[in-house]
Image (spheres, grey):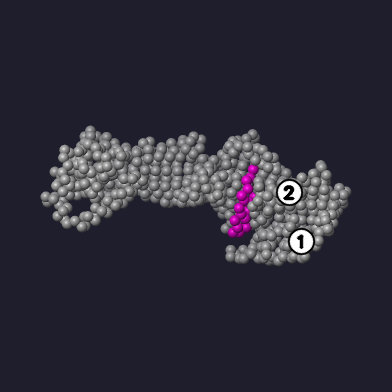
Amino acid sequence: MRSHTHRTAAAIALMVTASMVIAPRAVAAGPRDVTADVLADRDVTLTGDTVVTVPSGTTTYEGVFRGEGTLTVRGTGTLVLTKDSDFTLPRSRQRVSVQGGNHPYVTTTAPDPPAVVVERGATLQYGTGGTTGLIGHFPYGTPAFRLNQDNIRVDGTLRLSLTSAYNLGHISGSGLITQPRFLWGTWDLSGTNSFSGVIDNGTQVNAGRPEYATSLPRVRKILNQGTFTVDTPLGRTVTLGMDFYQREYGSDINVQSRPGGKVVLTGQYSWSDRGGDSDPALSDPALNWTPAHKNVNKRGTNIKGADVRWGDGTTNRIFMPGTAETVYINLLAARSRSRLTFDYNGPVTLGAPIGGGRFHDTLSAPGAGDVVIAGTRGNDVTFAAVQYYDGSTTVEKGAVLRLGLGRPGGDGGLYTRGGRYQLVNEGTLVLANAAKPLSLSRISGSGSLVQSGSATTTLTGTAVTYTGTTTVTKGTLALSSGASLARSKAIRLTSAGARLDAGAAGLRVSTALSGKGTVVGTVTNEGVVAGGPTVSGDYTQRAEGQLVLADAPLKVTGAVRLAGALDVSAAGTDPAREITVLEHSGRGKVVGAFSGLKEGTRLKLADTTYRISYRGGDGNDVVLSTVAASPSPSGGGETPAGGAVAETRGASTASGGLEWWPYVLAVGLLLGLVLPTTLRRKGGRRVGGRHSARG
């Protein structure tokens, strides 16, 4: 049994089922035609089904309808009601009654059939710009508002010309419900309505309140030329899936919710340049991003202490398309701070800043709320404007947040001066500004960070603690004021133009560094460096560090101090007469040596024997040069380059040459435990590191 019901305040409370009053239906005798009475302004007492046929033009009715029955308006004209009418369905057709009790909100699950029907081609108008002219019956003791028992089916047009606050009851049909502009009347839409037509809001609509829940699952479009307010009772989620349109300056959507409540908006709030009131539409989506004459293409939303979600993971049409010139978005605090979640299944672009000012003056104050990029597969959100909300930004696992479009005119950013600011990145953060430098701090999470824009991004402060991979594909990523990449599991400079500016503190590699770009500043290797990057500064490799020769040598412009391991196994697949391991363009000599590889030590790569020198090239490069003969593996002190790697740490990068070395290390350690000590000594000399020495 479904009915008009109330809910208790407790979260676990069950729905209170209202009683149904159903009597045997009487046999219909056909509708009574009261057209003559209406044209003569006589009051009409309904005693069953009643019909009015409205002639062309406008008919103003000074009488009232009362009694029990239904009223059908048909014809080609407009019937204007100037006085309030109060009638009900015959009791035999009423199926909703209300139990008493003090409950916090009301919802209707199975409304009565329509008491009023407006047929296609006809127009029914409530009021003439005053406070009377409504059809309604209000028997329910509902809290804080009056619920209309008289439901209405609109297949033609219902025009609401009232300045009072009123409830329409349940609405159905597929026509047009329209309210003129500047009447300052407020009408309530409550319950789950089956209306599938178009709503033209000229002044004010309340789609939900703390006292009732509203659902409009079949509404096709809403032309919003005033204020459309969405609210929820405690703990309720309201989903609105229709598209909103706007064509007049000063329209907005206000969203509110109570504790535990949520509002989900899955459509789009768009400019309209065609279709009129009955079928608003936009000829070109690009017009949403283009200012219009007298600023009439300006749409806004005010999120007032609400939990709002744009999208439900099944679309990638962003709810507010436009720029700061065509849209505004405010996050405000009311009872609590606001929360806005982006939940799309494909790329979307937010072209406007989120602020916290009053209506169009959105940037007069920071927004009071937090933003979440939901971890829905494919959710890829670009902020193409500098944001102005003071709270946190969370990128959930699997999601992508891009700051900047990567081209001029589309730079983004975050407001970092607020006390509540933090960036929690569990997904992917892409920094793609073309011209405006970015400065970010307080970045945590297990997600990755990608610098891909021409403009410099600076990570600042000791609260940069994210643990994902750091990739620079373009431009400069800079560190300052104690910022470190020590927790980043890998650092990749994927192009020759990629730069990592380590600042005065330098870069401490505790995990892995690889690629083709440049590190500006000193580098201290305590992890793994794959040859190929350029160090524009000093390079120090400690005993726990490892240098892996990849496709190109490590290039260093400053002083070089070496210890730790060298891995040149990858070079054995394509041996050459001379292999440069480290290209040192500085003036000083290389200090130190790789473990077990002092000057002149021989090592074997595949079937070729090399000798290592720290004075090669122009005098201070680290070079492997072939020797004339290559003795058999059992006949001398050479160690194959594919042998065990000593003194390395278990870090990996995306380069294919880094993923195998932990297994080589494990094999080498196992051999070290099994082989007799005498096999690891020769001529009374101990051989250290990866390679064995040969005099």
Sort mark 1 into few (<14), some (14-19) or many (20+) by Cα contacts within 10 Å: some
- Point out the tag, 1 or 2, that comes first from the N-terminus: 1
**14 relative to 559 in the view: left or right:** right
**318 relative to 598 in the view: left or right:** right
> Residue 312 shows which numbered tag?
none
Amino acid type at circle 1 is Arg
Q: Is residue 231 magenta?
A: yes
Query: What is the total number of numbered labels drawn onto the structure image?
Result: 2
Camera-nearest residue between 67 and 611: 611
Q: x and y percent of residue 302 in the render?
A: 60, 47
Note whether 437 is above or below 92 in the view shown: above
Camera-nearest residue between 636 and 206: 636
| Residue contact at pointers 1 and 2, CB within 8 angstroms | no
Q: Residue at x 36, y 36 (%)?
A: 496
Q: x and y percent of residue 296 in the render?
A: 64, 38
User: Mark 1 to mark 2: distance in Å?
Assistant: 21 Å
Q: Is residue 287 magenta?
A: no
Rendered image quadrant of residue 317: top right
Camera-nearest residue between 585 and 566: 566
Magenta segment range? 229-245
In the rendered image, which residue does mark 2 sit on?
155
In the rendered image, which residue does mark 1 sit on?
93
Q: Where is the C terminus found, in terms of image quarters?
A: top left
Mark 1 lies on a secondary structure that is: helix
Mark 2 lies on a secondary structure that is: loop
Q: x and y percent of residue 688 in the render?
A: 19, 49
**88 relative to 297 in the view: left or right:** right
Q: Residue at x 21, y 41 (%)?
A: 608
Q: Is residue 369 visible?
A: no
Q: Residue at x 23, y 33 (%)?
A: 618
